[in-house]
Image (spheres, grey):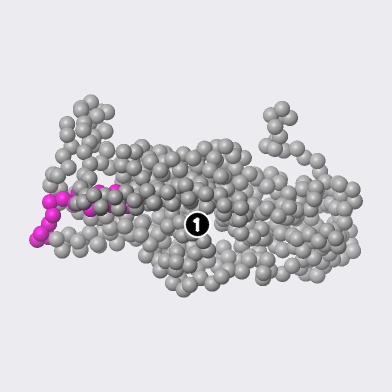
Amino acid sequence: MTQTIDRAWTKGEKFLFRVAFAFFLLLIFPLDLTWYDRLFHPRSFFWILSSLAGYRANFITLTSESARWGIAGYATWGAALLGALIIAGGWTFLVRKNEPENYNRLYYWLRVVVRYRIALGIIAFGFLKFYPMQMPPPAISNLETDLGDYNTYKLYWQQVGVSIWYEVVLGLVEIVGGILLFFRGTTALGAVINIGVLGNIAHANLAYDGAVHVYSSFFVLLSLFILVPYVAPLWKLLIKQEDVSLQLYRPAWKSRAQQIWAHTVKYVIVFFFTILYGILRYDVHFKQGNLKDPITPGLAKAAGVYNVTTFKLNGQDLPYSPLDSVRWSQVIFEKWSTLVYKVHKPFAISLPNGDPQPKDVDRSYELAGVAGGNRFLYYRADTANGLLYLQDKAQKTAWEDRNKPTKPSNKTPEKTKSKEEDAPQLVWHFTRQGSERIILSGLSERKDSIYAVLDRVPIDYPLQLKRSQL
């Protein structure tokens, strides 16, 4: 059986195509003016490529829990579909007296746009995992967090983070799936790979409240659209066992020059978003240090978990109680410049996923989705004078999360100050008695004097041991 490519389309097929054409273009091409402002005022060429690869349509901004983690997050799709139906209706009315026989040429170019949109987005997605930076291994404070004190998405991300080679392979599969979509001969294979990978990510984010379900579902939807021409032939080949010759429309170039230009543009895009993007992504993360976890080393040989043996508030000794809302029960020094103390008191939980940031003080992945009375403090150590300059890492993150704008703004975004520039500081003295004891003293935000004796607790985490040590 031969599939003809020049047949006349039915009225229903034409209308469905008009809806699909408008729907996908509304979701693919940015209509937000602030996006263009960011595109033309980038920090570097890498951020131009990232803006092109990472655009997400957002016609409706909702603040409900379902909008963030559930079905209401797809409201923009509904708005795009409504707009597409209106456009398709107007289009049908305008061509009613001179309706074309088919839309083969437009359908071809729509498939090209969809293919490249998937490729750009999924390759950028893949490099985050391939290096791997999207889901870093758990920090010490995360390993000490009770299971019930995790937001579900962070629990899922930690599971992937401890399986670093799984994350790398997953990223490689995404990159390969995206590259396959650049070429007509491997389009179907690339679409199938992306449906499998992104479909898994979408339902995992729905199950674990990961807030990436809409974006991953978007690529699944686009990939399903790419596979539409293959459905009927595959049914006849695999189910009805008939011979099939698939012939897809392909426009003929009017001149050799047109063909050369088309191939030049294609391979420039392929080069920019594969080889060059991979190099720049590596540079941004590992050379410029734009990471999720801090990189500034903490106090030398201090990393670990400490019991608070003695705790004094305004000179008064407070005995240990797991229900005390003032006395610290545990202190953790990370290998980087983060100090975490635990107290029986609720703190604002950071809900964002902790995107990579250029400064340690703004890197919030370690505290994202973590409860349990843990307070995360960024510190700078003056070892000559025995001083720690500390800032609350959750304070600004929680404020930004509560005060996100409900509507997109067309104003040029102002340069954002980091917490290092505008947050108040705590100054504590520290002394070390041997390698296992640290004494902290200073003032709290309320100007109460605190004095804490910290004794290290030897802990070997199975996740950090080699097989021979287990």
User: Does any portion of residue 254 appear in the rendered image?
Assistant: yes
Q: Position of residue 358 (x, y in %)?
A: 61, 59
Q: Secondary structure at mark 1?
A: helix
Instruction: Please tell me whether residue 421 belongs to the stretch shown in magenta.
Output: no
Q: Position of residue 335 (x, y in %)?
A: 73, 49
In this view, the residue farthest toward the bottom is 411
For the point 32% across and 55% down, the residue is 24
* Region rendered in magenta: 96-113
For the point 75% across and 53% down, the residue is 298
Q: Quadrant of the C terminus?
A: top right
User: As shown in the figure, which amino acid type bears the numbered disc 1?
Assistant: Phe
Q: Position of residue 246 (x, y in %)?
A: 22, 36
Query: Camera-side residue: 442 or 257?
Result: 257
Q: Quadrant of the N terminus?
A: top left
Q: Residues within 10 Å of mark 1 (few under 14, many from 20)?
A: some
Above or below residue 346? Residue 462 is above
Above or below residue 453? Residue 445 is below
Above or below residue 336? Residue 384 is below
Q: Which residue is mark 1?
A: 46
Above or below residue 195? Residue 34 is below
Q: Residue 55's quadrant in the figure?
A: bottom left
Q: Position of residue 309 (x, y in %)?
A: 86, 51
For the point 57% across and 45% down, the residue is 132
- Left or right: 233 as drawn, with respect to 156: left
Instruction: Please tell me whether residue 110 belongs to the stretch shown in magenta.
Output: yes
Q: How many marks?
A: 1
User: Does any portion of residue 365 appear in the rendered image?
Assistant: no
